[in-house]
Amino acid sequence: MSTTDDAPPAAAGWHRLAFATTAIACLGFGAGYGVGALRAPAAASPTAIAGVAMTEANLAGATADLALRVDRLAGAERSFVAWRGQIVGTEALMRAGLTLREAMLADGSYAAPLDAVLALPGGADALAALEPALQAGAAGAPSREVLAVQLDALAGSVLALEQAEEQAGWTRRMMRRMSGYLSGRTALQGRRSDAFAAARDAAALGDLPASIVALESLDAEAASVLSGWVDAARRRMALDSMADRVAASMVTYAYR
């Protein structure tokens, strides 16, 4: 969308129209003066009377043409004002849409920016197809940066359970280690560590889909601890996609 102040063709011809209007006004003044000078007494000749009549007819025609040009000038001005008003309104709507998109990509609720867009003229029309989904998800979701930090904390808490057991007395630790080998606990903890490492690396890069895939290899016990994080990550991905659709909808509406 162009937001420049280039005037439409009607506004671009104002100078020429104003010059023509001034010329016609001067013509009308001259014609009126001529009428006064040529207006003869009752005993004037028929030729003089005919000249006066012709001058008056020319004056009437010039006056009508002047009125027509003035009306056209007023119409051009109204068109220019309407055009400027449309540009200003569209710019305000686009700015509000950009603020909404940024709020959707950030952490937390975007309800206030959404209400601001819908309150503007054309806002509801621009977001008509997305409004139900936008209203439903207005509570927002954690940002990708926040999700990466949360995943680090959750992974650390799961892995710390095994580390706590390692801090027990030597005899108890050896018995538990032997029991762990027999039950496959050590192998399980290794798989958890590998899954968390892959998931955390992906989340640090903002690659939530890869992070979710890495966590799918977790056992049921560890997966239950991460289930809330996975749900939040899926909401974040959905909001990111919807934020792009908001931007596209605003641009489409602006160039309608």
Image: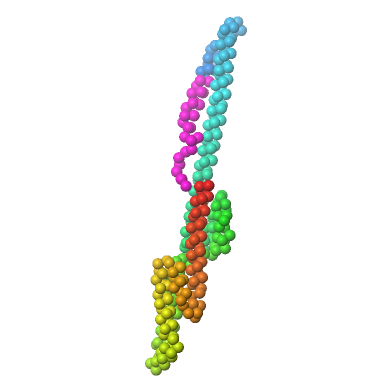
Indicate the quadrant where residue 130 lies. Answer: bottom right
Indicate the quadrant where residue 42 lies. Answer: top right
Tell me, yes or no, whether the highlighted magenta stretch contains residue 208: no
User: What is the x, y in percent for residue 7?
Assistant: 47, 38
Q: Nearer the viewer, residue 172 or 40?
A: 172
Residue 151 in view in this figure: no
Residue at the outermost bottom position? 171
Q: Nearer the viewer, residue 181 or 38?
A: 181
Residue drawn at x 51%, y 56% is: 246
Residue drawn at x 40%, y 75% is: 197
Looking at the image, residue 99 sits to the left or right of residue 45; the answer is left
| In the rendered image, the vertical position of residue 15 relative to residue 180, given as above or below | above
| In the rendered image, the vertical position of residue 61 relative to residue 151, given as above or below | above
User: What is the x, y in percent for residue 118?
Assistant: 56, 54
User: What is the x, y in percent for residue 211?
Assistant: 44, 70
Magenta part mainly helix, strand or loop?
Answer: helix
Residue at the outermost right position? 42
Residue drawn at x 39%, y 94% is: 171
The magenta span reads 1-28
